[in-house]
Every structure is written in C-alpha cells, then in structure tokens.
Image: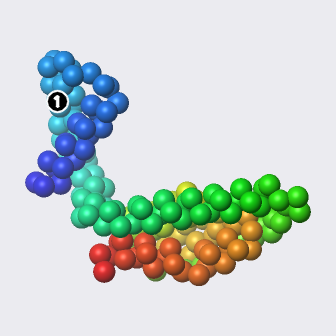
Amino acid sequence: MLRTVSAVAVMFVFWIVLSGYFTPFLLASGLASSVAVVWLARRMGMVDAEGHPIGLVPRTVFYWPWLAKEIAKSAWDVTKVILSPRLPIRPALVRFRPTQRTEVGLATHANSITLTPGTITIDAGHDEFLVHALTSASAEGVVSGDMDARVTRFERGA
C-alpha cells in the first residue's frame, strides 16, 4: 500500500511541476489522472520494489551529491583534454564485471557511467559492462571500482 500511495504522490507532484496550474478543477484532474495511472500500473504488476524503489530514496541523499561531484570533475577533465593543443585523446574500450545484482543497481551503475562526461556505457549485461572511455585516465577510473562500490552500497544499503 505504501508503494501505491508513494507512486500516486510522485506522479501528482510531477504533474503539478509540469503543468504549473493550481485551479481546483485542474488539481483534481491531475490527482485523478495520477490515481488512474497507478491503478493501471498495479493491474499490470508494475508497482513493485523494482518499478518504484522507494527504499532507495534515503540513500540518494549520499549518492547523488557524490555523483554530481564526479560529473563536475569529469567535465573539467574532458574540457582540459579538448582545449589542450596536443589533444591527448586515447579512446579505449573497457570490459569489467559489475558487483550489482538487481536490475535497479545495474541500471543505476550504467547510467552513472554514461552521465559522467568522457565515458559511455555501450553494453550493460548482468555479467559485464562494456564502456567507451575518451582517455586512458577515464578508462582507469571506470575499472578502479570506486563507482561500482558506491552503487553497490546504494543498491544494498550497506
């Protein structure tokens, strides 16, 4: 029941943010639409621990700021590479085994890599990821396992 109420609340807040209208009729319509969408999603079996992972919400307080810092650092590194007269680009394809086991954990890890400038996840399977890196330093950063360990802590709550 908590997932259902949470899903309706998230959908309704999202609707309010996108619409920007606060008349009683439109607010009621937005709430009714949110309830209808969640009701249909429950009937399809999509409001579950994986489809709406509310247990991860408290952990985002620690993970998202770290990810934002990594994105900023990586953006600065890519900017330096691009603006350098020598253009020290050393593209590399890197394969490694992620330690996440849930779909949410694997998707979070693959998307976190792709959000970081200079790297992109090409293939994200259960057994291994294939990542393209712009420089050898960014390739080493992917393989080092810091992001992998943080996403695993985010996923498992350890």
Q: Nearer the viewer, residue 38 or 56?
A: 56
Residue that sits furthest to the left in the current view: 1
Q: Residue at x 19, y 18 (%)?
A: 23
Q: Residue at x 48, y 59 (%)?
A: 68
- Residue 60: % across, % down: 34, 62
Tell me if residue 125 comes above or below residue 22 in the rendering.
Answer: below
* Residue 147 visible in the picture: yes
In the drawing, does residue 109 fall left or right of residue 62?
Answer: right
How are the colours assigned in the image? rainbow
Task: Evaluate whether residue 118 shows in this view.
Answer: no
Q: Which residue is mark 1?
A: 32
Q: Quadrant of the C terminus?
A: bottom left
Kind of residue sitting beneath label 1: Ala
| Left or right for 146, reference 74 | left
Quarter of the figure with residue 65: bottom left
Find numbered disc 1 in the image and state the secondary structure of the residue it sits on. helix
In front here: 155 or 83? 83
Residue plotted at (22% across, 47% down): 7
Image location of residue 17, percent across then percent down? 31, 33
Q: Is residue 74 left or right of residue 7?
A: right
Q: Position of residue 18 (x, y in %)?
A: 35, 30
Q: Residue at x 30, y 67 (%)?
A: 59
Compared to residue 46, the image places residue 58 above or below, namely: below
| Number of numbered discs | 1
Q: Nearer the viewer, residue 31 or 73?
A: 73
The quarter in which the N terminus is drawn is bottom left
Image quadrant in which you'd find residue 3: bottom left
The residue carrying pointer 1 sits among few (fewer than 14), some (14 to 19) or many (20 or more) residues within 10 Å by Cα, namely: some
